[in-house]
Image (spheres, coloured by chain):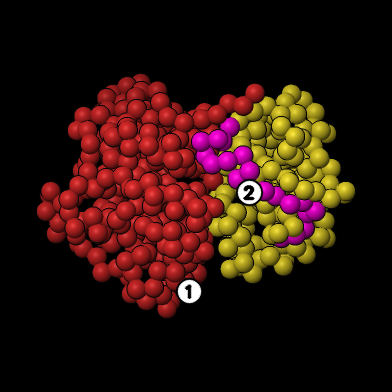
Amino acid sequence: MRDEATFRVKAGLAEMLKGGVIMDVVTAEQAKIAEDAGAAAVMALERVPADIRREGGVARMSDPTVIEAIKEAVSIPVMAKARIGHFMEARVLEALEVDYVDESEVLTPADEANHIDKWRFKVPFVCGATNLGEALRRIGEGAAMIRSKGEAGTGDIVEAVRHIRLITSELRRLQGAEESELPSAAKELRAPLELVREVAERGRLPVVLFCAGGIATPADAALMMALGAEGIFVGSGIFKSEDPPARARAIVEATTHWQDAARVAAASRGIGQPMSGLEAAKLAEGELLAGRGW
Amino acid sequence: MAGSGGRPVGVLAIQGGFEAHERMLEGLGATVREVRSRSDLDGICALVLPGGESTAIMHGVEREAMAEPLRERIAAGLPVLGSCAGLILLDRDHLGVMDIRAQRNAFGRQVRSFEADIKLRGFAGPPMRAVFIRAPWIAEHGVNVEVLAEIDGHVVAARQGEMLAVAFHSELAGDARLHQWLLARAQ
């Protein structure tokens, strides 16, 4: 008797990605470079976030041709993004047998009130969060992996740091709370009480927590690991840099050896210029992606 | 018990699901050491090769120049538990220490991943809850390899001397029997 698509099976793949780097790629060739550099998975996209920002327009799910070419090129898991609330894009991605769907704020949201009901899918979902309540709401909807959002396509780490620090400090606060305080904490977090109780008891999310949005250097990746991330998403940071294969290898190495600054230093040498980046604090309100989703 | 208070059990922590194995071993009273570079192998009494992405883990093993010391120690009888990607690492095409050929992602992509109860020869008690995630199977094996479990005719657990290789994750279902086996054989 085989039980498919149980929550344990969905969350289990994220468990296997831990300590690894998931890289945004737009072509099969980039996917191969990522795999050869030691990526734990790739995110198949039409445009990296930095280009979505620059070019504007509506950002949608990738062309299936691109996703299929990437699936052909590598043996590591292939993820792809669907717009927030666009359950039909997610259905298409499931039919294409991608390994994880990212319901992502980097794409233009399709539904202003509802996220995808992720329980209705066999394919697992990863979702972004800026705080603990948002993470628990996504898990309540069936997400099997969470990534802190950061501010995608900027190469500026400040929002990623803000989000992971907020999530981990809220986790600590819940862990210290008394049982009688949990219903009001759940109300404050706008999160299901059952999940709030589980988190209070364990002191950690019930799913794997990665970090995303603005990681551009090996030291950035090590910083996020030190702040409590269990792995790293790198979007524009690799293929918008001067030497993508070298930078990809270096970020992988720094993610494994984040506790050893000498190794992070060694990994940071001779890898060319990082992406130039945009200062997140100087972006206009309407240009921020992290506010999408609720 | 071996591995408790004395020499640590190494868990390869280059990338992958190493923490779940650490929790199982610590639950059994063992001292655990994460193995991220060559020197971490010194003095360990047993080793877990966890699940994860085998290409990413193998990339790290080569970067750390860890393949040769791993081969030497395993050939010298260091007890090893390899799970999923760890099974792949042990096979002929990777570390080459176990006389098996793993077929990667043999059960298919993530939407085909599953869990099931399986009976492992030589392990007493109820069936083991086994979680198969983009799992491999053992496509070929030599005569010195003892097959412990099959699913639909495909070998998913096997033993050769001090090496135990499984295609699944029992650590995700909280079953400690494989880790007990490892600790019982720890040097």
Of A103 and B174, nearer the camera is: A103
Quarter containing the N terminus of chain A = top right
Q: Which residue is mark 1?
A: A266
The Cα atoms of the two marked residues, 1 and 2, are separated by 33 Å
Q: Residue at x 78, y 64 (%)?
A: B72
Looking at numbered disc 1 in the image, what kind of residue is underneath it? Ala
Q: Examine the rendered structure and indicate whether residue B54 appears above or below residue A291.
A: below
Residue at 51% across, 30% down? A5
Please tell me whether mark 1 or mark 2 is closer to you in this view: 2
Direction from residue B128 to residue A116 in the image, left or right: left
Range of residues picked out in magenta: B95-114
- Does the magenta segment cover residue B113? yes
Callouts 1 and 2 close, C-beta under 8 Å: no
Residue ID at (75%, 34%): B153
The x, y position of residue A203, in whole percent, is 44, 36
Q: Residue furthest front?
A: A65
Of all chains in the rendering, the one displayed in red is A
The picture places residue B63, in percent across and down from the top left corner, at 58, 68
Q: What chain does badge 2 belong to?
A: B
Q: Residue A228 in magenta?
A: no
